Each structure stands twice: as C-alpha cells, then as structure tokens.
Image: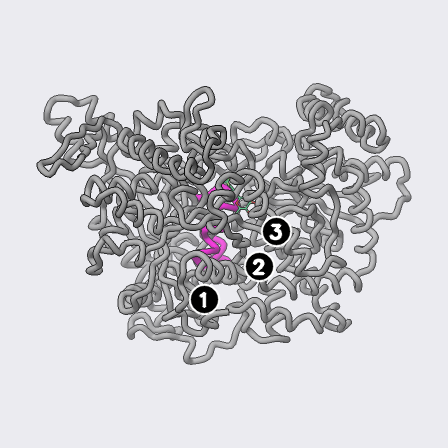
Amino acid sequence: MVKQTTKEHDLIVDDERTSNTVAALKQGILDNLFYVVGKRVEVATDLDHFTALAYTVRDRILARWLTTREDYAKHNVRTVYYLSAEFLMGPYLANNLLNLGIEDVIRQAVAELDLDLNHLIGRESEPGLGNGGLGRLAACYLDSLATLGVPAMGYGIRYEFGMFHQAIRDGWQVEMTDYWLRYGNPWEIRRPQACVEVGFGGHTQSWADSFGEYKVLWSPNEIVKGVPFDTPILGYRSGVANTLRLWRSEANESFYFDRFNSGDYEGAVGAKVFAENISKVLYPNDEEIRGKELRLQQQYFFTSCSLQDMIRRHETAGHSLENFHEQCTVQLNDTHPSIGVAELMRLLVDIHGFDWDKAWEITSHTFNYTNHTLLPEALERWPLRIFGLLLPRHLELIYEINARFLTIVRAKFPNDEARVARMSIIDEHGERYVRMAYLACVGSSHINGVAKLHTELLKSDVLHDFYELWPEKFINVTNGVTPRRWLAVSNPEQSELMTSKIGLGWIGDLDQLSQLERYAEDSTFRSEWRGVQHAVKVRLAQYIAEKTGVSVDPSSMFDAQVKRIHEYKRQHLNVLYILTQYYRLKKDPTLEISPRTFLFGGKAAPGYFMAKLIIKLITSVAEVVNNDPEVNRQLKVVFLPDYNVTFGQLVYPAADLSEQISTAGKEASGTGNMKFAMNGALTIGTLDGANIEIRDAVGHENFFLFGLTAAEVAARKAAGYHPHQIYESNGALREVIDGIGSGRFSRGDGSLFRPLVDSLLNSDPYLLFADYQSYVDCQDRVCKMYRDPEAWSRMSIYNAARMGQFSSDRSIRDYCKDIWNITRFEIGAGVPASK
Ligand code: GPW
C-alpha cells in the first residue's frame, strides 16, 4: 500500500470506541479477538488475528455506511443498481485500509501487538465470486461509484462455492472446490428482515375482472426465499460506503413445512434441496453458455430478489411506483440479469396493477444493457422448453413484448419479413429459443459496448438490425480499472516513487499521472524507476519459487500472459514464439537474446478440452525448456497455478511485457491490458478491444503492434482461409508445429497434442498461423529494445503516465453522463465533481 503522511483531518473519528488512535485500534483488535472470535491472545492463530483485525476495521466502516444511506435519502438523486451474476471483489482488508486512510496507524497498532500487517493482509482469502474480466469489472465499478459518491448498489448472488481452485498435476489442470466461507466472512452482514420470495414453475390462469380487465395469476410450484447479505463498499477517502447486496437462496419455511405436515416428506426435502441449490455454485464457464436449467434459476432468482428489493426501497422512501424509472436505473451486466425486463413487467402489471403501456414506459426507461462479447457461443439463448416450464408467466410476457416490438419493426421496415424473423426475441429456426440479448435491447434505453472497436462491431454486426432501428440507443463506454487496488494497493513501490514526485492526487484523479511525463527524459528518475521495478520482480520471483519450486531470474524480462485460458486469447500463439526461440537457440547456442521469463496464469473451464490441452502444452514446454541447459539461461517458462485477484496483484506490477494477443475482433475490451500498462509494462498486442485506445493514449512508438486488423481477419475468412498453406511456406512455423506434433515436448507421445495441431492445420479458427510471422518479428523487436534499458524505461514511464483515462472513475463518469443521467455528485467529498 502506498505510504502516506496521515493528516489529522484524514482520520474521521466516529466515536471514542472506534477512534483511530493507536491505543483504540489495539483495544479494538483485542476486544474483537476475545468477544467475536472467542480466543485468548496466547492461543490465537494468524487467521484469528486477521479476523479480529478485519472486525476492527469494519467497526470503523459502519458509521459511514449508515450515514451514507441517510445522506443519499436527503438528496433526490437517482440510484444506480448494478445487476451482475458475478462480482470478483478480491481481498478487502488492504483496500479498506487505503480507502479509510488508516494504514499507518493500523500498522503501528498491529506492530505493538507483535504482529505484522503485511502478513495478516496475506491471510485473507478472496471471495472468488466471478470468472474473470466481467466480474472484476463489476468490482472496479463499485469502487469508483463509491469514490465518486454516486448512490449505487451492486446486486448479485452469494455463491456458497466460488470459482474453483486450480492445481496442476502432471501438467494438467485439476479443479478443487472453493468453500470460501469455511472460516466465516467478517465483511458481510446478514439482513434476514429484508428477505424476499421468488417463485418457480407451476402454471398461469387468466380471467377478466369485474371491470373487464384481463388479469393473470401465476401459481408457482416452488417458492424460494432470498436472504440478502450486505458488504460495505468504501470510496477512496470520500467518506462514502455503498452496499454490495448478495442473495442467498434458502428454503421457505412455511412452504416446506406445509408439505412436511401433509405427510409429503420427500416433497418437503426436495423443496429444501431445490431452494438451497440455487445459490450453491458459480458456473465456471467463461464466455460460453451451456443452457443449464440451474443457471436460468440463478439468473431469475437474483434478478427477481433485486427488483423486489428496489421496489420496496422505493416505496419505503415514500415514492410512487409511477416514478420508479426516475429514481432508479438498472444496469444489466451482460444478459445474465436480462430476465429482469420481463420480471419488472410482471411485478408492475400482475402485482401492482399497472396497465401495459404505463408498465412498459417504466420498464424501458429503467434498464440499460452492457454487452461484453461478440462471440456467438457466449450469446445467451434459452430453449423455450426449459424456459416455459420454469417461468411460464414470463414466457407469456415475452410473447407480448415481442409481438408489440415486431409491430414497431414492421412499421419502420414494411414488407421485410426476413428482418422480422432475424430480430424476433424468439428464435424460430429449428428448436425455438428465447434470445436474451434481444430482450435486453428491446427493454433498455441504452445499449453499450465496452471499447470503441467493440461498440462499432456491435453496431455493424451482432446487433446491426437493432442499430438500424434505434441508432440513438447505442453508445460506447470504454472499460476502466480502479487505480486504488491495481496501483496504490498492489504496487506500493511504484506508488511511492510517483507520489514523491507528483503528490498523492493521482489516486483519486488518475489523469494527474501525466505530470510524470517530464520525468521520462530524466535519467536519474529512470534509474529509480528501474530500481523499483526490480524490487517488485524480486518479490514475485520469491513467490514463484515458493509456489512452484521454479527459480526465475529477476533481471530477465518478465513477459506475462494472465487471463482465462481461451483459444481466442491465443495463449498458444505465445507458445509458438517460445518454441521458435527454443529452436533458434538449439541451432545456435551462442545466439544473444534478452533472457526472458514467460509467465502464464489462468483457469480453463472444466469442460473446455482445448483450453485444458493448452495448459498441458504450456507446462510440457516449460518442462523441456527449463531443464535444457542449452536454453534455460535465456528462456524460462512458468505456469502460475490458481491465478486469481490476489495473484494478479503480484503479477501486474512485476511484468515488463504484457501479452494482449487475441485475434482482432474477438476480445471485447480486456482490462488486464490496462492494469499492466498502468504499472509500467509495455504491451505487445493486436488491434483488438481496448488495446487500440491504449496504444493511442500511450503513443504508437511505445506499443508493440502486430497482426491482422479486425477487418482483415473478416476478409481473410471470407476469402477462404487455408492455414495449411502458411504451414507449408513458413519453415520456422513448420518446425515448431512438427515438434509439438511429434511428441518432442510430450515425452515422445505424438498423440497428446494432436487435437491442437490438427485444429490449427485444418481450420485455425483464431488465425494463429496468419499472425505468426508478424508476431515473431514483433517479438524480435521487443527483444532488441529490452537490451536498451534507458529506452525501455523511457517507454515504460510514458505508458504509466498516459493511462489516466483508463481509470474506472472515468468510465463511471461516462456512465453517469451518457447513460444514467446523473450530473450531480452530492457527497463524494474531495473528488472533482464533474470532468
Ligand atoms: F461473455 N467477459 C468475461 F460477455 O470476462 F458475458 N466473461 C464473460 O462471460 C463475458 C465477457 C461475456 C469479458 C470480456 O471477454 C472482456 O473483453 C471484457 O474486458 C470484460 O468482459 C469486461 O467488459
């Protein structure tokens, strides 16, 4: 964490018990150890001390948390509800200390108890309630919302089992369950009074009431209870604490006892199992849908809980439901909560008695939809069969929404039934499906992509018909990441150096990093910069030695690719380059290249065979390369097991080179690319996602660009792409592919990597071969540049200094201005009000 002089006014004293003097903090830790953890100091473990400390910090958050609520109530501003099936929050302690501004005093209090703060920070295990980029983005956005003082709440699922832990056995990924609640969770508070009920299945009946109005009654055959668990989300020095509210599914006692009492023992037990299963486990498939019923249950469960909760809060605050959309705006984080469009219609029409048109006006002005992918396999659609059994009333509502929508399409595009079929929320080609992205588009005021290129591709391609119908709905908001966690907390060394030159302002206003630009030309500063980077690399090297037993040289170039394992992200293209270097060195052991350590980290979806095979390929190549004395002084390959947020906080600061090498047009934005560049890594990348904007910001001369553009990728495919021809004509590539195929890296087993090699030779859907030579040439430029430390650190400083616009604070300001129509920031003290 960044060191800072603690000024008196930084320490908001809530009362005597929770004041921030060293004495009060020590007493707090001891009290919590005794009264909450139930241990005496003499027998307390590290974990006990961590827990006592966490409660001591939480005690200092509570007053702010309650005050924030009251303050929001005073100002008549809209509340943002961020609905997301995933929140990848990472550990809280260090971040909360930074945001409260009490790190120094806590460090001292802890030291006086003979404990070490960094060690205790390291004891916190992270809640892995997300898969990757999408879930982590939600976490960064909560941080910025609180920092800016935007009234906001995150809503999601309190999975009992988060993302699996990954072990590597015999080079393969092995999954282990993540029971993250084993030792309790000191940050959350259960709120049983705010429970809601959610129905599933059953049937509907309709009739005309005494005024001749059409009415529908849905009688579900299962009713589940949603119990909220709240976690405070602090803003950076803003005095604000917003809420992350996660729902746990539990059996509804009366429903369960009714069955029990009527002698239906099995039915009662079944109902309990059904209920508790819903929030049991996070689906570990990133960017791939599997059409599983339980997943739809999860989506409907948390969306319904959240909407009912919003309505209750809205009414409790004394507002009329007619104004719901004026007080509340709901952001749909991808299509996972898009069933909310039908659910809000149900709540308004069936439960609160609104007529259709008024209900639709409210609904369509409440929702906004963020799309995070162009991959066809990730676009959610539910078989009508499954959908109708689970949510019969919602299916009727969707039919009605669709019928009215298609009337609009026909009015604007007469005599174009092909277009009507293309745009229908119900896909009728073959088996019938509900297209969730289309439901989200129809029910939302704004639709946004997450980087400029991505938004353009949405408009020209995936959602082209919707763009032609409603061009004004489309808008881009480029992703951002929080500089608190991803710089101040994770890279204290670089943070301190930057702060010593430009002050602390950058933490709450990342544009201030531009003041570092002039130091790029200062050789003393450059050498300090290198000193800091080296220290950070030593830290990672120690950790790698402990975790994997591999020793890596901190003065070699750290080249990192950490992200989910996916063919489109092309970890295997990176491997092709490693092997190209391997063969070059084998042929000429005197070859002078910059020594490099290739770091990989990331999880593969358990059912994604190719991704798992890519992990096996990386570990197999590592085994050969690391043990070959002819090459292992210049090349090292490490697969870092169980990559997660905590691990990321170690890796981003330590990298020299950031690999962002997806096939152009496939990565919607990427956010790791931003974390690396902020920490001074140079990027080797394609013109994909936010890479394009990063390159424009840091300067084309400070970015290693290679590969086809998205347009060229499309053209190559349209013209008929033949990877085999490239293989035939490129000797170095052929040598590498033949080596993998022959078993040279799999102890002679020529069949192991056959599926991978065959896929590349026969179809190469992600165009590795087309980009191979360009990538290798670019890597050779990287190698050369790294041998000039002065030039390299100049580029590194320019990268860090020019990343201001990739703060999630900027993204949230964009959402406020262009989507949520929030122009006033009433209580985000100390933050520039509008930029
Ligand atoms: F498919 N992303 C992700 F769009 O991490 F839903 N998981 C997902 O399931 C999806 C997207 C989904 C990522 C994108 O791949 C990445 O490019 C982007 O930066 C990130 O979402 C945040 O927008």
What label does residue 724 carry, if any? none
Residue drawn at the location 58% of the way across and 34% of the way down: 168
- The amino acid at mark 3 is Ala
Mark closest to the chain's N terminus, 3 or 1: 1
Residue at position x 22%, y 59% from top?
319
Amino acid residing under circle 1? Tyr
Label 1: state its secondary structure: loop
> Disc 1, ligand 1: is the CB inside 8 Å?
no
Distance in Å between CA atoms under marks 2 and 1: 17 Å
* Residue 313 picture location, percent across and down: 24, 55
Whole-angstrom CA distance, mark 3 to mark 1, is 25 Å
Q: Circles 3 and 2: CB distance less than 8 Å?
A: yes
Tell me, yes or no, whether the highlighted magenta stretch contains residue 519.
no
Label 1: which residue?
236
- Residue 147 location in percent, x, y? 44, 65
Of the numbered discs 2 and 1, the one sitting upstream in the chain is: 1
What residue is pinned by disc 2?
A: 806
Residue in the image at 22% along x and 52% along y: 312
Front tag of 2 and 1 = 2
Residue furthest out toward the left: 210
Does the segment drawn in magenta span residue 123?
Answer: yes
From which residue to which does the magenta span run? 118-143
Name the quadrant containing residue 774: top right
347 lies above or below 33: above
Residue 345 picture quarter: top left
Give above or below for 296 relative to 76: above
Tell me the residue at 20%/23% (across/down). Answer: 267
Labels in figure, total: 3
Let me know if residue 538 appears in the view: no
Question: In the rendered view, does 19 fall on the left or right side of 670?
Answer: left
Disc 2 element: helix
